[in-house]
Amino acid sequence: MPESLALPNDFEWGFATAAYQIEGAVKEGGRGPSIWDTYCHLEPSRTNGANGDVACDHYHRYDEDFDLLTKYGAKAYRFSLSWSRIIPLGGRLDPVNEEGIEFYSKLIDALLRRGITPWVTLYHWDLPQALHDRYGGWLNVEEVQLDFERYARLCFERFGDRVQNWITINEPWIQAIYGYATGSNAPGRSSINKHSTEGNTATEPWLAGKAQIMSHARAVAVYSRDFRPSQKGQIGISLNGDYYEPWDSNEPRDKEAAERRMEFHIGWFANPIFLKKDYPESMKKQLGERLPALTPADFAILNAGETDFYGMNYYTSQFARHLDGPVPETDYLGAIHEHQENKDGSPVGEESGLAWLRSCPDMFRKHLARVYGLYGKPIYITENGCPCPGEENMTCEEAVNDPFRIRYFDSHLDSISKAITQDGVVVKGYFAWALLDNLEWSDGYGPRFGVTFTDYTTLKRTPKKSALVLKDMFAARQRVKVAA
Ligand code: PNW
């Protein structure tokens, strides 16, 4: 293997999941409902009839699942805590559910016993329903950041003796846009979705964005002041965002469109969080008064702590074409059209098992360089993966044979290696999405991202080939001798 494909010996790697997608047991152990419980039980269904009531039943089967991690050779495991298991009503004055704390404590100990490092996400889209009902949840910027701060502090207090890697929020963009602009995720608010009865796509996503920025900032401030010095851990946030190239590479307006699209995806959050700067100019210009200002008081909170790393969730890339004419108030992409083929008809990448996901490893490498160049923090890939073409309709025997996924992992690891050895990007870890097939949100139980096949009738787990080859891929890359 050439030197360009090396990975550092201390490179962290493992698999990722999220609470609502795998746990089930939604009414056990004193858990309160979240906005996803409500959303999955709406009539008519907005999730293909699917819900997380049982999911993978990880709540009762975590030991078996962690044995899989051992078998796969994982060094680390990323999972999320269900806020409403820990504080069923969510708020800063509401009671703590000791049974919920106990459950996650057992989980953490079960990982440590196996020598696997826990990576804990505090929030992966499952806001306590009570906070949504009480004051509008993520739409109430002032209230929700205080409740999130208390929740975060409680987690640092109870788990921080054993957990040294924290992710505050998973993909605030998806929470804000799918939850409040398109209405395709909980809480399903939108003024452009025929299934939504409430919402305002022109204004609400931008409030939900600010609420998450400030919630992150408060958690980081608390960690920096009261916990990092003694617990010696690190804290970051996981941002999604595709890489964009111009649809017409000879058209300056398409080049601007590509950059603007990435500002709307990433700069929205990364400017305030990593640079302690205002939102990108392109957003301020397009959204005007609808973008809630970051005030000097907000910057005091943002400046009170340091975010240690950039968690990157990367799946795919696209082409951006500038939009002619007036921009509708409901636009959230930055006045562009998204394409999977460029002007010459070249596809951005190979098709996977989901329409939105093409395999684009070369653009991943550019993405890594762009993000590191702009924000300058060590990057951990906190999600990367895909369903194979046709996998949705395969039997277990067919699905365990997954060469497409193996190639996807290998080519994306190549890009990480090259970004490190040739582009000077600091990438320190990689989490494959996902440990096992699980509830793919509004797409239900169709798409299978797992390296483990889940039979949703028997709940039997069967390792796919991809699960067993990752260990060797990392070992080979870490064996490469690098000239001093
Ligand atoms: C992420 N897109 O979501 C989430 O963090 C996971 O919970 C999820 O299962 C995984 O990716 C696979 O989808 C995304 O449409 C959902 O570009 C949609 C998109 C990106 C990420």
Image: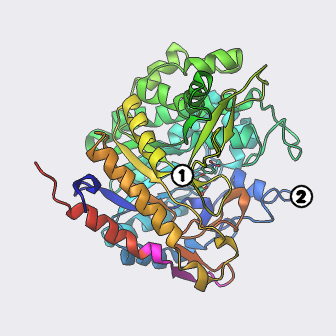
Where is the N terminus found, in terms of image quarters?
bottom left
Task: Please provide percent x and percent y for residue 408.
Answer: 48, 61
C-alpha distance separating marks 2 and 1: 30 Å
Residue located at (20% from left, 64% from top): 479
Q: Give the range drawn in magenta.
A: 458-467
- Per the image, label 2 sits on a secondary structure element best described as loop
Question: Which residue sits at x=53%, y=34%?
Answer: 266
In the rendering, which numbered label is found on residue 178?
none
- Against 431, is 132 above or below? above
- Crowd rating for badge 2 (residues with CA inside 10 Å; few <14, some 14–19, many 20+): few
In the image shown, does 102 or 452 lie closer to the viewer?
Answer: 452
Q: Which amino acid does label 2 sit on?
A: Pro
On the image, the x and y values in percent for residue 35 come to 71, 50
Indicate left or right for 16 with 321 as reference.
left
Q: Residue at the location (32% across, 52% down)? A: 417
Above or below, 429 against 333 in this view is below
Q: In the figure, residue 21 lies in which quadrant?
A: bottom right
Q: Is residue 69 left or right of 357 when viewed as pictured?
A: left
The magenta stretch spans residue 424? no
Res 315 label: 1
- Judge left or right: residue 363 versus residue 193: left
Q: Is residue 463 magenta?
A: yes
Question: What amino acid does circle 1 point to?
Answer: Tyr
Residue receiving disc 2 = 44
- Mark 1: C-beta under 8 Å from nearest atom of ligand 1: yes
Give the image location of residue 232, x and y in percent.
27, 45
Q: Which residue is drawn at 51% across and 56% down?
A: 80
